[in-house]
Image (spheres, helix red, strand yellow):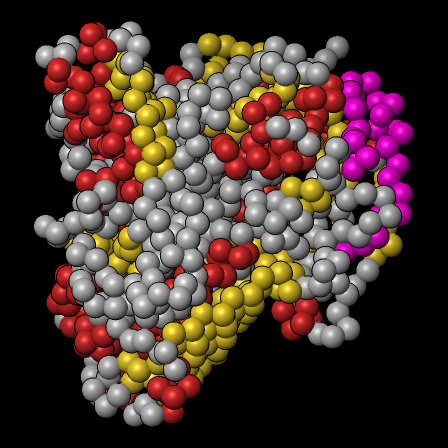
Amino acid sequence: MKETYTFTVNGIERTTDQDKPLLRYLRDDLHLHSVKDGCSEGACGTCTIIVDGRAVKSCVLTTKRAVGKNIITTEGLSDEEKEAFVYAFGSKGSVQCGFCIPGMVMAGKALIDRVPDPTEEEIKVALKGNICRCTGYKKIIEGIQLTAAILRGDAQIETNLEKGDAYGVGQHAFRLDVREKVLGYGEYPDDVEMDGMVYASAVRSKYPRARILDIHTEKAEALPGVLAVLTADDVPNNKVGHLQQDWDVMIAKGSITRCVGDAICLVVAETREILEKAKKLVKIDYEELKPVTSIAEAMAEDAPKVHSKGNLCQSRHVTRGDAKKALAESKYVVTQTYRTPFTEHAFLEPESAVAFPYKDGVKVLSSDQGVYDTRKEISIMLGWDPERVVVENKLVGGGFGGKEDVSTQHIAALAALKVNRPVKVTFSRQESINFHPKRHAMEGTFTLGCDENGVFTGLDCEIYFDTGAYASLCGPVLERACTHSVGPYCYQNTDIRGFGYYTNNPPAGAFRGFGVCQSEFALESNINLLAEKVGISPWEIRYRNAIEPGKVLPNGQIADCSTALKETLLAVKDAYESNPGRAGIACAMKNAGVGVGLPDKGRAKLVVHDGKVELYSAASDIGQGCATVFVQMVAETTGLGKEMIINKGANSEVAPDSGTTSGSRQTLITGEAVRMASADLNEDLKEAGGDLSKLEGKEYFAEFFDPTDKLGADVPNPKSHVAYGFATHVVILDDDGRVKEVYAAHDSGKVVNPISIQGQIEGGVLMGLGYALTEDFPLKNGVPQAKYGTLGLMRSTQIPDIHAIYVEKEELLPFAYGAKGIGEIATIPTAPAAQGAYYAMDHVLRTKLPMEDTYYSKKQKAVK
């Protein structure tokens, strides 16, 4: 007789005869989808529940060990608690991608039950086991503080805030998705359940570089419950790729693998358990080959070719004026070589997709950064017209650039068409770490010159990127690294050469900052050395060179009226100057919109239906909040209340192509299309006397496109981008060398939602500090050595006091109410500012990230 295990879940006694992780029982058997699977390793905290009054990670507790225990998930909160958490987290801006939030709520509840009036320090400690990659924790801590106050009776819920009585541009808007994310009922792809759904997963390469001699699938195919084992022979066109189709869907027999993330075959099975058994039964015969694991190895004349065309993936040469002459005539010149590592996005939601046969093709429920891009890649693989592929975003649990390439979507589609059933593909955390593109590792030598007054004269630099096994977005990322390596300053002599090389390391691609994190770290570090030679402060040298409206950027573009870099410098001046010997400063600029001559278009459609306005725009909201921003813009333009506007989400079947969520573009580019369509609706609404019912069935479509000049265009003042955001960050250390405070001043044009922008800045700052101080992605012969828990991600107990400052000018761009993107730039200036702080403290120039010989590196060494 089988042993049974009995425990209580949300007040109901439950019994099972299966001994398995409690996480899987709660999700698969009880369908409690608030309990998220972020890593299954006990490292991330997304699966946090309360067990006998304590916050516990359900992935490390089994049904056998749960016997007799009282378990609570978010679904089991009282109505009073639910309303308190929803209101507090919404009003404080605690929610971005939302994947970590139910776990944060449960950790918060466990604390509040014990300590009804917790201090900030007590909350930080309570959240130590829960990672958030979006918010920087500050807003979550504030949300838990307010929740506690409401439950104590010391604060009240303002019901009109969630209703959105004031929901225009500039208002403290309660995000559209707060309630479903806080309470955990919002659907991410891995939460989707469908009749007849089965599961698929790839068997991946054991080696970064090896010839596949044979693939033995017979035993797996013979296992009851296995529906198919697919290989490269089953793929109509065995290539995908975001821009360059160089990425094999599966490595064919006789071919050579390029990284450990490479798929060899795809197993489809009735259950997850059968799937895992079947994958172990697949045997692959390899001829192991020596991998190419560095830029130097890739450049060697006798290097093995990672791709048949050679190891140089992309190159860029950006010039203006005469850098050689300018540097030769400069009073002071500094040359330094800098190295930055691969880094992992570590979004909380591992990649997942559900695909099923649909009409005359396939539909994919996805977590990605652009449904039309995903549609295009799947259609290339299948050899179909793109219209036969429909891609719809469910909730997206973070991206930061790491979900621009297809991952699970195309193999889910392939499997669904093969077995003619709905198929779910969800990566394990290690699979995600091994597979998706990272931030590029860089080696770069930068030479910057100035005159006797510290005015910059010229820049020469050579940048090398390791793009790993596949191109991903190597070209655009390398291009941004080059075009932004000049910084937000006024000088006209530049010679910048950039090269991206294939290796057998995991692929590299887009990551928040998009190449600029690497090159700005180098440039801003050189600026501090020049200031020293001139005999002026790092703040002063930046202010003397700072771009301002009407002046010319190093790329030739004339700075527009909204440019407010000097204002950001002034905003942090006191903080910087009142902390001598322990403060570092850095500036940055970042484009909003793709630019460089590409047809970067925003599109939106409004439909009046059942007395409400439906908003259609295929712009992925990956946590940054564009779905809410668009509704705010409709409300601002038409005067309609939030309850009259419904954002229908990103779906390629019904929403117009609004481009990728990348390049800090959606708020400005698609936002302006939303504003234009709303203006047309508003004209008709005025004629209808404000009666929306008279416009029933009417549609309003708008496309926004502001042309730019291609890179190297032969015009005196080329326009590279529609707009730039600017920022200055100051990092302040304490006596022990810990980061105590960060002042982050941002010019992001008109602030559409003040709650959201603060969280974006705080999250970007903490990500930048991790890049500077704690995060690494060690490889051994091309094989990742990190697990999620060893990536060096900063936790709640490590956060400094972050002051998010936004600068708004009266003179703004005429688009999207003057708004510019904040998502990427928030993470760029932090690492060089941290490096500058350490240099101010001990006069040691740290040219490599994560920085060595800091409080953090010593602490990590001690832990090891």
User: Which of the 4 quarters of the picture holds residue 759?
Assistant: top left
Residue toward you, 332 or 262: 332
Residue at image coords 16%, 37% = 170
Magenta span contains residue 777: no
User: Which of the 4 quarters of the picture holds residue 716?
Assistant: bottom left
Residue at image coords 23%, 55% = 746
| Residue 345 in picture, x, y percent from top left | 49, 48
Q: Quadrant of the N terminus?
A: top right
Specify whether 4 is left or right of 370.
Answer: right
Q: Quadrant of the C terminus?
A: bottom right
Residue at image coords 87%, 54% = 287
| Residue 273 in picture, x, y percent from top left | 71, 24
| Residue 137 in picture, x, y percent from top left | 32, 44
Specify whether 339 is left or right of 491.
Answer: right
Residue at image coords 82%, 35% = 233
Residue toward you, 224 or 473: 473
Check the image and report above or below for 301 versus 438: below
Give the magenta part as a residue range: 209-234
